[in-house]
Amino acid sequence: MSRVPRKGFRFNPVHLAGWLFADMLLVLALVSMGDRGDPLAAEASGASPRPSASTSATAPKPKPSPTGPRSVERKPVKFEVTASAGDTDAMVSQLTRKTARYKGRTAAFVITFGNAPETGVGQAYAEEINKALKVARPTMFRGATPRNFWSKGSTGSADLEIYFFTR
């Protein structure tokens, strides 16, 4: 008895079982991570701690120090900077003014959309803005990860999204 050679690939649903299992596992991991609260964010929002059954009126308990890695706030701080390309002084002064209310905070990462008609020009402008950030607020942006993107628009402006670490 001779075998007939196969022509083409035959679909077999068993081949997808491993991928389906891996995708489901990834979804479950993301759901479980998103379900966990951030204790530092709760403190920053002013939420009061739950009273314990053994609370003593005479001796206040010391505040526990947070453990584990810092978290990043979910909502970014957004603003626009308008300055001519290469005008670092104007960029630095605007960035200093627009980040003044966040003094003392530490940025985790910055997404900068350089507006320009062409991609390369917009990304180059976004890179200039990100360099000016480190001049305007060196301690705020030390170790922050900047990302340069392009957005179609008129040259000489950038839209920033700054994600800060929780307090």
Image (cartoon, rainbow, N blue to C red):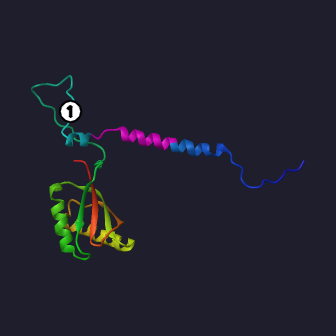
Q: Position of residue 157 (x, y in %)?
A: 27, 69
Instruction: Give the answer, above or below, for where 95 lies relative to 34.
Output: below
Instruction: Write down the residue under mark 1.
Output: 49
Q: As drawn, which residue projects farthest toward the left? A: 58
Foreground: 155 or 35? 155
Picture quadrant of residue 12: top right
Q: Position of residue 121 (x, y in %)?
A: 35, 74
Q: Residue at x 33, y 72 (%)?
A: 124
Q: Position of residue 136 (x, y in %)?
A: 19, 66
Q: Residue at x 15, y 63 (%)?
A: 97
Amino acid type assigned to the residue bearing label 1 in the image: Pro
Chief secondary structure of the magenta portion: helix
Foreground: 52 or 65? 52
Q: Residue at x 21, y 74 (%)?
A: 88
The range drawn in magenta is: 24-38
Q: Position of residue 14 (x, y in %)?
A: 65, 42
Disc 1 element: loop
Picture quadrant of residue 90: bottom left
Q: As drawn, which residue projects farthest toward the front? A: 154
